[in-house]
Image: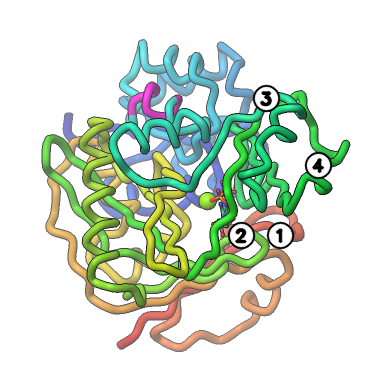
Amino acid sequence: MKNPILGIIGGGQLGSLLSVAAKKIGIKTVILSDDENAPAKNFTDKFIYGKYDNKSITQEFIDSVDLVTYEFENIPFNILQSINNEKTVLPKPEINNLIQNRLTEKNFLNDINIQTTQYVSIKHIDELKENENFFPGLLKTTTLGYDGKGQYKLNSKRDISNEIDFSKEYILEKFINLKKEISVIITRFGNQKYEIYEPIENVHEDQILKHSKIPADVSKEIIIKSTEWSKKIVEDLDYIGTLCVEFFIDKNDNLYANEIAPRVHNSGHLTINSHNISQFENHVRAVCGLEKIKTKKIYNAKMINLIGDDILIYRDKKFSENEFFFDYLKKDIKNKRKMGHVTIIEK
Ligand code: ADP
Ligand code: MG
């Protein structure tokens, strides 16, 4: 199919940047979002607002596109599946279903011999008390968490409190003494065909990504291992599109896969300016079955996330020619919320 119309579920900054990348190569996008004021409505060709379980809304969406992708993983499996019955959904709904739950995601990684932090499933407060050997640890909801939301740091048994909502399921992860965090972004086009970006070094503040940069200041061994693991993950999943693997490196230089995002990722925003083809364009090319173009780095780069009020200073700032400012045009400024980013390339 030449130049299909691409449906995207979700209207946040990732949906916006996917739309911009698609437009650049002549692909029209239609966005379905359950947020009436989703920022992507400023960037997409067509915007459909409605709840994802509303049959007539999803039908309108299905009827206006040739295929579907998504910008976030928290979409109920049955909804993705029913869309997939009419128009191809990529990445495949089963992959999203596996990855959207931290427990099945980590089980999958260990099954293919990729090291993760030590973890245990916690469904009840008693199980938490019985697993003291995982303290100090992080208790994370198995589903729907992002930017550190739904997480509790537990240093010892004494930190188990009534504030923890046990109507939800959790995993308890041993806390790691982090030296560094990196991510690897890879776009798979088919059997053994991919474009892979060099590892990106990430700094989080309050569990929210603050800075990303390339090159990552890590050893050759870490670069090789994280790249090999990422290839293994996409091959094993028979994945199509862009995927991101987040990694931890501890003080003894051990590498752990932390989580997989079955989508484009915030740490890859810098690829818009650092590479000939961004993670977004590669995703659109892969899911739409377009030509794979050799992806090359042009510049080293650093990205700063603008969180909450940060955006106000940048809206009035004058930028040099090596600085690229992106305003997500979100309706309201909220604390701890990603409002925009700036990428600085090294010329
Ligand atoms: P989210 O889905 O919110 O991104 P993550 O599991 O990636 O959840 O956690 C967010 C951040 O919290 C990580 O990038 C890391 O900085 C910190 N973190 C998470 N798990 C651990 C851990 N086991 N040990 C140390 N730090 C952790
Ligand atoms: Mg994360």
Give residue 295's position: percent from left, percent from top.
Answer: 18, 60
Residue named by callout 3: 123
Type of amino acid under label 3: Lys
Q: Name the quarter where the C terminus is drawn.
A: bottom left
Check disc 2: other Cα within 10 Å, few if <14, some if 14-19, many if 20+: some
Image colouring:
rainbow
Instruction: Look at the image and give the residue range highlighted in magenta.
Output: 92-97
Q: Is mark 4 on a helix, strand or loop?
A: loop
Q: Which of marks 3 and 2 is nearer the N terminus?
A: 3
Q: Indicate whether 300 appears above or below 25.
A: below
Q: How far apart are the two marked residues, 3 and 4, measured between alpha carbons?
A: 14 Å
Outermost residue on the right side: it is: 162
Q: Name the quarter where the N terminus is drawn.
A: top left
Q: Do the residues labelled 3 and 2 touch (CB within 8 Å)?
A: no
Residue named by callout 4: 160
Q: Are marks 2 and 1 in contact (CB under 8 Å)?
A: yes
Q: Is mark 3 on a helix, strand or loop?
A: loop
Say which quarter of the image contains residue 283.
top left
